[in-house]
Image: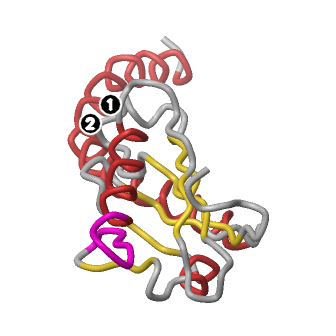
Amino acid sequence: MSFEASHASRKRRAEPLIRQSQEPRLDGLQPLLAGAHARGMADALELAGIAAVLIDSHGMVLHAGDHARALFGAALRVEHDHLIGADGESTTAIQHLVEMALGQGREPASIALSRSNGTPLVLHARRVPGAAGNLCQMLKVLIMIEESPAHRVGN
């Protein structure tokens, strides 16, 4: 038997053992990779200038970008890892938006939050494609925020 044939034969026998020995390490990497996906998404949104908040499967804030934080104030803020409005009614509306986005039904309607300067903040919730079925994917929902003088609160 030639060296090449002998080497190929040993390699074929060893491949399942090598794969098997690496599986636990790969399983341990999944949460890190899921976090990396969320971080990459956050970076991309920031570079695009999109004000966004990243939400996990429990409705908790994973990350609020600088553009989103620039819009925060009395009408919208993060408190104890949750998006909170200026009052109970707006906080309930935000929580409902997040719950609907985490659900299986249709995408939730956008909501508008009144602000003292008269320009409402409009929140749009979008599911992250493929995230619902991936238990190791931390990021589940994107909340995009925009100022909208044309959007009337209550419509």
Name the residue rendered at 68%, 64% in the picture: 44
Where on the picture, by quarter, is residue 42? bottom right
Name the residue rendered at 22%, 77% in the picture: 80
Q: Position of residue 1 (x, y in %)?
A: 48, 11
| Vertical side of 111 occupied by 150: above or below | below
- Which residue is tagged 1? 19
| Vertical side of 139 occupied by 17: above or below | above
Which mark, by number, is residue 45?
Answer: none
How many C-alpha atoms fall within 10 Å of the one at disc 2: few (<14), some, or many (≥20)?
few
Q: Is residue 62 left or right of residue 127?
A: left
Camera-side residue of 133 and 149: 149
Rounded to the nearest angstrom, the CA distance separating label 2 from label 1 is 6 Å
Residue range in magenta is 81-89
| Vertical side of 50 occupied by 72: above or below | below
How many C-alpha atoms fall within 10 Å of the one at disc 1: few (<14), some, or many (≥20)?
few
Where on the picture, by quarter, is residue 17? top left
- Which residue is tagged 2? 23
Count numbered badges in the picture: 2
Q: Position of residue 111 (x, y in %)?
A: 53, 54
